[in-house]
Each structure stands twice: as C-alpha cells, then as structure tokens.
Image (spheres, helix red, strand yellow):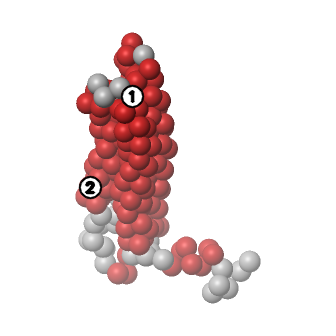
Amino acid sequence: MALSNASSWLHALLYISPYTFSALGIALSIGVSVLGASWGIYITGSSLIGAAIKAPRITSKNLISVIFCEAVAIYGVIVAIILQTKLESVKSSQQHFPESMRAGYALFASGIIVGFANLVCGLCVGIIGSSCALSDAQNSTLFVKILVIEIFGSALGLFGVIVGIIMSAQASWPSSRI
C-alpha cells in the first residue's frame, strides 16, 4: 500500500496530531480506570448487601473491599495528572516531528496500559470482595485470609501504574529553540 494513498491507515496515523493521541491516552487512563472501579464496586456491593441480610455484622468490616475498588479509580486519576504534566506546547511546524509523534504515542500507550490494567484490577478486586463478603457471612474466620488475596489482586493496578509511569517517561517533546 503506497504512502501517497490518502485512505491508508498509515497516512491517517502519521497525520493525526500527537496531542490527539496524548489526550486520548489521558482520557482512557481515567475513564477506563473509573469503569473498572465502578464495576468492582457493583460486584462487591451487591454481594455485600445480600450477605448482610444473613449476617448484619459483616457490613462495616467488608467495606474495605469497596475502598480497594475505589483506589483503582484513584490510580487512574493520579496517572492522568502525571500524563497531563507531560504535555508541552510545540510550534505547529514541529508538531509532526518524530520526537513529537513518539511523545504522543508514549502518552497514548501509557494511558491505555493504565486504564486496562485498572479495569482488570477493578474486576479482580470486585470478584474477590464479593467472595470475601459471602464467605465472611458463613464463617468469620475466613475474612482475613481472603482479604490478603484481595490485597494481591489490588497490586495488579499498581503494576499498571508503574508501567504507565515508566512508559510516560519516554515522552519528550521537541524544544522550541528551532
């Protein structure tokens, strides 16, 4: 496929502003992280409410699972703020320089990684929190054991944040001295 073909995907990807990719990365970081958190809260909360009918004592103790899910959204907000600080203004003549494109793609990839890692983390924490609430309603000695597993599931989101921060470190825009 020739580069001169205006309908090619390569042509489209090369001439879309790197700021568009950066903005999409920032939006995906926060948006998909919040989606993962809300999905986890939905899974945990519905089981917590149902199990609290049988054992009302579990309600306050198992709110820690909801807090873990909410932390997933906070991870996305933190990374979105970090990615936002990486944006720099460049002249329009430098907008499609390789350095600008690399910076835009780095922020885009960082946002995607953080967003989807937190989506999976939110689901993981939600499912484990749900099983924690149901197990605690049956046998209160299982709470701490399952909570440890939930902490390991929450670490998945932190891994995504770490990888996202490392990838965003590659974002360097051209200096405006040219």
Measured in 3D between alpha carbons, the distance from the residue under mark 2 to the one under mark 1, in whole angstroms, is 43 Å
- At label 1, counting other C-alpha atoms closer than 10 Å, the crowd grade (few under 14, some 14-19, many 20 or more) is few
Would you say 117 lies left or right of 49 here? right
**Quadrant of the snapshot with the N terminus:** bottom right
- Judging by the rendered image, the residue that carries numbered circle 2 is 81
Classify mark 1: helix, strand or loop. helix
Disc 1 marks which amino acid? Lys
The image position of residue 93, as x and y in percent, is 37, 81
Residue at position x 39%, y 12% in the image? 141
Residue at position x 44%, y 34% in the image? 130
Q: Is residue 149 visible?
A: no
- Judging by the rendered image, the residue that carries numbered circle 1 is 54
The image position of residue 137, as x and y in percent, is 40, 24
- At label 2, counting other C-alpha atoms closer than 10 Å, the crowd grade (few under 14, some 14-19, many 20 or more) is few
Residue at position x 28%, y 66% in the image? 88
Would you say 82 lies left or right of 6 here? left
Q: Is residue 173 visible?
A: yes
* Label 2 or label 1, whichever comes before in sequence order: 1
Q: Residue furthest right?
A: 1
On residue 73, the disc is none
The image position of residue 170, as x and y in percent, is 40, 52
Vertical placement of residue 97 versus 171, above or below: below
Foreground: disc 2 or disc 1: 1
Disc 2 marks which amino acid? Ile
The image position of residue 123, as x and y in percent, is 48, 42
Classify mark 2: helix, strand or loop. helix
Q: Nearer the viewer, residue 40 or 47?
A: 47
Give yes or no for contact between labels 2 and 1 (Cβ–Cβ under 8 Å): no
Vertical placement of residue 68 versus 89, above or below: above
